[in-house]
Amino acid sequence: MKAKDIIKNGLIKENPTWVLVLGMCPTLATTTLAINGLSMGLATTFVLMMSNIVISLLKSVIPDKVRIPAFIVIIATFVTVVQMVMQAYLPDLYDSLGLFIALIVVNCIVLGRAEAFASKNTVGQSFIDGLFMGLGFTWALTLVGMVRELLGAGKFFGITLMDGGMIMMILPPGGFLALGLLMAWINHIRRKSVKKA
Amino acid sequence: MAKKAQSTLVNMLLSLTAIALVAAAALAALNAVTKAPIEAAQKAKVENAIGAVLPKFDNLKDQTVDGCVCHLAYDAQGAFVGAAIEAGNDKGFGGHLQLMVGFDTEGNVSGYQILETHETPGLGALAGEWFQKGGKGCIVGLNPTQGSLTVKKDGGNVDAITGSTITSRAFLGVVNDAAAIFNKLEK
């Protein structure tokens, strides 16, 4: 597979949020603010990239029957790394993302890419796949966060644009609404551009 | 591609053990590096909160009353200027609510900071600004050591956060508890 195709898959064609619809729990829970969505996306990108590299390196020494526990240990290690580093150097961000960092371990995107991609492809390809799947997740989360923050609190990345907003958009129903409508809109554009090409 | 390891018992045991050992060693090493910064960050958070809730002071003395950590502040001459008290309860809408409440010498609230909260974003989470000076339910300057603060709905004189009476009650409960502790302090 060519690097260009892997990049395109991660960002658009097989975008984890809009197309594969994986990892919905952190997507809904952390996107009350754009900055939280962005940080959560980047934390997941790091884990995805590192676990993809290591799993691809070890794919021939991990027997098939124990591959899932092996993958989970590797993923959990990198999640703990993110957690400890964030707690030490970005304590405020850690307070607002808290529990959801630990939950990256069970994010289906990470295990999904390990199983579907890293365990079958070369290290280089797996690295590109992890990085761009992560960035695809990041831009989706940031977009949902931007919409919810703007409509819910009248702010753009913490800068006040309007006075107040609809509190509902920050609460869980607003998360479902924003995610669903954005998903419909983005897939509409995506289908249209596929037809043209 | 190299031949894949077969799923024999020995292979499975060896590969999983090796992966777990390497992972544990890597995390232990990282823990040694990040332990000090994590503790420093937590300490800085408490110190910032003390600075934000108290009038100007030069020295701090810590005292523990009824299991709550209290920070007593003194000026350069050794005169008592106020106390910051860490208190909390589990009556919040989302569970535990932990505050740092500052009192001046008379027991008037000089400020507060939220240390831990699980309140609803956009509703209960507004407690961070709502009860501050200039907020709609300002408690700064009120004196809970003379009589408990309660929301208007319960016959008190503090405006509850719109749509978050439970959070407001829990919040004022913590402030009242802190005031009770303030009365017990040896200044």
Image: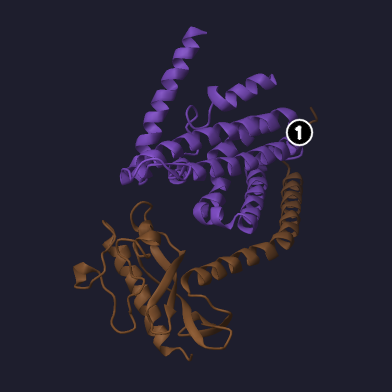
Is B24 on the left or on the right of A112, as rendered?
A: right
Which residue reaches farthest right? B2
Q: Quadrant of residue B97?
A: bottom left
Q: Quadrant of residue A187?
A: top left
| Residue B184 drawn above or below residue A109 | below
> Residue A158: x percent and y percent?
46, 45
| Residue A186 drawn above or below residue B111 | above
Pick the quarter of the image with the N terminus of chain B.
top right
Q: Name the residue located 56 percent from the left edge and 88 percent from the top edge.
A: B78
Q: Name the residue located 45 percent from the left edge and 67 percent from the top edge.
A: B113
Q: Amino acid at mark 1?
A: Lys
Is B28 on the left or on the right of B77, as rendered?
A: right
Q: Name the residue located 50 percent from the left edge and 39 percent from the top edge.
A: A23
Secondary structure type for disc 1: loop
Chain brown in the figure, letter: B
Query: Could you say which is closer to the camera, residue A34 or residue B158?
Result: B158
Q: Which residue was labeled with disc 1?
A: B4
> Residue A110: x percent and y percent?
59, 39
Q: Report if residue B5 is visible in the image.
A: no
| Residue A131 drawn above or below residue A91 | above
Which chain does the numbered disc 1 sit on? B
Q: Name the residue located 26 percent from the left edge and 56 percent from the top edge.
A: B163
Which residue reaches farthest bottom? B186
Chain purple in the figure, letter: A
Is A91 on the left or on the right of A122, as rendered?
A: left
Display colour scheme = by chain
